[in-house]
Amino acid sequence: MEVELKYKITSREQAERIWNDELFADIEENGSRAKISIKAAYFDTKDMLLSENRIAFRIRREGNRVVGTLKWGDKDVDESGLYVREEINVPVTDKACFLAPDPTIFRQSEEGRKMVELLGGGELVNIFETVFTRRKFRVDTGSSLMEISLDEGEIIADDAKAPIHELEVELYSGNRDDLIAIGNKLVEKYGISPETRSKYARGIALIK
């Protein structure tokens, strides 16, 4: 399950201030800071069968690693920007995965098998892509482990584009109260607003 908070970043300067802030210096994991380039392609049938069933199919390159992700069952995002979704991630080695991914890569999971059955052999097509740079670091409260990341880039769908400027706080382990507390500290100091539309939702909006 994926549990995370998303916030809008209003400028590159604001992103730099957050990245260089020592607000969480006492709980930041040493050596956890990293910067990676990410490219992701989202797939669906031509008639948007997966989207209609609230399923997201993504292939993403994170640095030198390629991962297939299936997300489903997302609840309505509340006003705090809290996302709670079921998620499966699998490594992908197929060189053609960004052109014609094999939906059976998720066959080890029940939801993956249901998705394949839903597709019924229908062809998957690339509906939009995201290209962005992610800067990230981990924090450990003693009871919860989280990752804080800053994303800057674009969502690209044919001739339409939308910017990506956001901050995410993802709960890796522990309790949700610690996640909310970290988010509240960031909101209090920077006045940032919740991002109530995921990259996927914004990409879907571009193609409709």
Image (tube, rainbow, N blue to C red):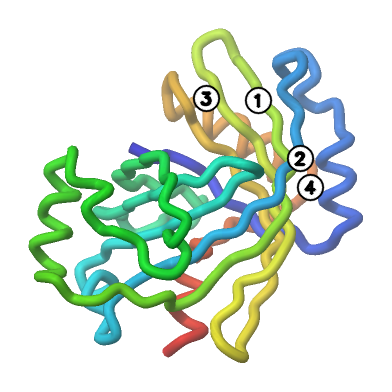
Q: Secondary structure at mark 3?
A: helix
> Looking at this rendering, what residue extends furthest in the top direction?
142
- Nearest to viewer (mark 2 / mark 3): 2
**Other-residue count near label 2 (Cα within 10 Å), few / some / many at <14 / 14–19 / ≥20:** some
**Does residue 165 appear left or right of residue 183 in this picture?**
right
Q: Earlier in the sequence, mark 3 or mark 4?
A: 3
Residue 74 placement (x, y as % from top left)? 31, 54
Q: Earlier in the sequence, mark 1 or mark 3?
A: 1
Q: CA distance from mark 2 to mark 1?
A: 13 Å
Under mark 1, the amino acid is: Arg
Q: CA distance from mark 3 to mark 4?
A: 19 Å
Look at the numbered discs 2 and 3 and tell me whether their residues touch, using CB distance below 8 Å: no
Residue ID for mark 4 = 190
Under mark 4, the amino acid is: Tyr
Residue ID for mark 2 = 35
Q: Nearer the viewer, residue 100 or 33?
A: 100
Residue ID for mark 3 = 178
Q: Earlier in the sequence, mark 4 or mark 1?
A: 1
- Nearest to viewer (mark 4 / mark 2): 2
Q: CA distance from mark 2 to mark 3?
A: 25 Å
Q: Secondary structure at mark 1?
A: strand
Task: State whether residue 162 is above or below residue 183.
Answer: below
Look at the numbered discs 3 and 4 and tell me whether their residues touch, using CB distance below 8 Å: no
| Image quadrant assignment for residue 11 | bottom right
Q: Nearer the viewer, residue 178 or 31?
A: 31
Task: State whether residue 156 is above or below residue 79.
Answer: below
Residue 141 placement (x, y as % from top left)? 60, 14
Identity of the residue drawn at 54% across and 70% down: 129
Identity of the residue drawn at 76% across and 23% down: 24
Residue ID for mark 1 = 138
